[in-house]
Amino acid sequence: MGRRSIPIRNSNAGSWREHLLSELDKLEQLPAGTDNFSPHRPRSEVLNFARQIADSLKREDLLLPLLAAGSDGSLQIKWQKDSRELSFFISPAGAEFVRVSSSGEIEEGPLREPAQANELIAWMLAAA
Amino acid sequence: MTGAVSGSSLDDPRIGKGEIVWRLIPSHWYRADPNDPNSPRQVAEIAFSGDVSVLRQKLAPEALVDSVYNGRFAEFGILELSADDLRNRGFVFEHEHDPEWGTDTHFLLRRAGVDGVTKQAKFQRLNQTQKVILARIANAKPLLREPK
């Protein structure tokens, strides 16, 4: 494993949103498929829900999220801040969040609407 | 969430004690922090969504991985997982025959749950917490083989 360098703070307001939307566009270009071994194009309702999260979030000072597609038409949006992690898993069956605290505790729950992401982002950004 | 049950009644005994299973990892699931492209790549939790195929190492040598499905997995990474460790953490194995891999080679990593109607034990897909746990295991040591 290489040495981890210090992340570059995202100083360009709004760029995380552009990044997220751009990454969703890339995921939309993935091939459709059914095997269990590789990522596939997320379903349209999944992509739409992810775009609604981007529209709903009020904070502009976020780092860039990681986006990746699952083998089952789902996708993950993941932010990390210091030792905290927040992921949204969006699938055709619904959306859920997972947050990992600084102590490593894992909590998951339903993400009932895109705007709920704001309170979860606030948790991630709060001082440890 | 459906309650977890002891996996012993569902877990497939064909995967024996001390065995190693492989999860194939394409580059899409092995990524650097987008804020720091030079950071070490890590396995993302989404690598364990849906039906999570694993292969028994002793029946699926690297040469087989590279040749099945017309070489489709030749550029995939290989994550080694201890079957004992997975079982100790509550995961179970479900056999899914795939003739391309040969007999008793291809399994799905599952959670043991209870059917809401029949109350019978049944295999379920992994929950989000289990995906986080698997990503932790995956990133605790280097992959056996990194994806290209």
Image (cartoon, grey):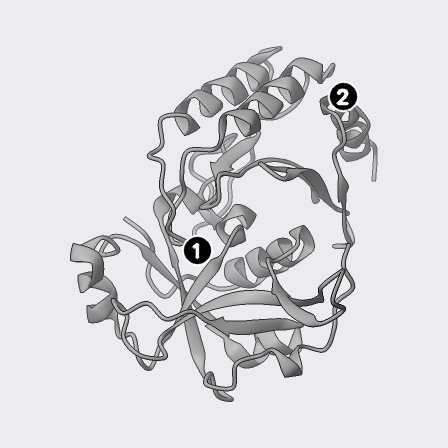
Relative to A12, residue A3 above or below: below
The reply to whether discs 1 and 2 touch (Cβ–Cβ < 8 Å) is: no
Left or right of A33: which side holds B46?
Answer: right
Indicate which disc, 1 or 2, sits on the residue closer to the N terminus. Answer: 1
Give, as a three-letter code, the residue at label 2.
Ala
Left or right of A109: which side holds A45?
Answer: left
Relative to B38, residue A122 above or below: above
Residue A1, labelled with which disc? 1
User: Residue at 70% of width from left, 40% of height from top?
Assistant: A96
Q: Are marks 1 and 2 on the same chain?
A: yes
Which residue is farthest top?
A13
Q: Position of residue A80 (x, y in %)?
A: 64, 37
Write down the quadrant of residue B100 in the picture. bottom left
Give, as a three-letter code, the residue at label 1.
Met
Observer-nearest residue: B49 or A122? B49
Q: Residue under circle 2?
A: A115
Residue B104, labelled with which disc? none
User: Residue at 71% of width from left, 72% of height from top?
Assistant: B120
Write down the quadrant of residue B66 in the picture. bottom left
Disc 2 is placed on an element classified as helix
Disc 1 is placed on an element classified as loop
User: Residue at 58% of width from left, 73% of height from top?
Assistant: B92
Which of pointers 1 and 2 indicates the residue nearer the eye?
A: 2
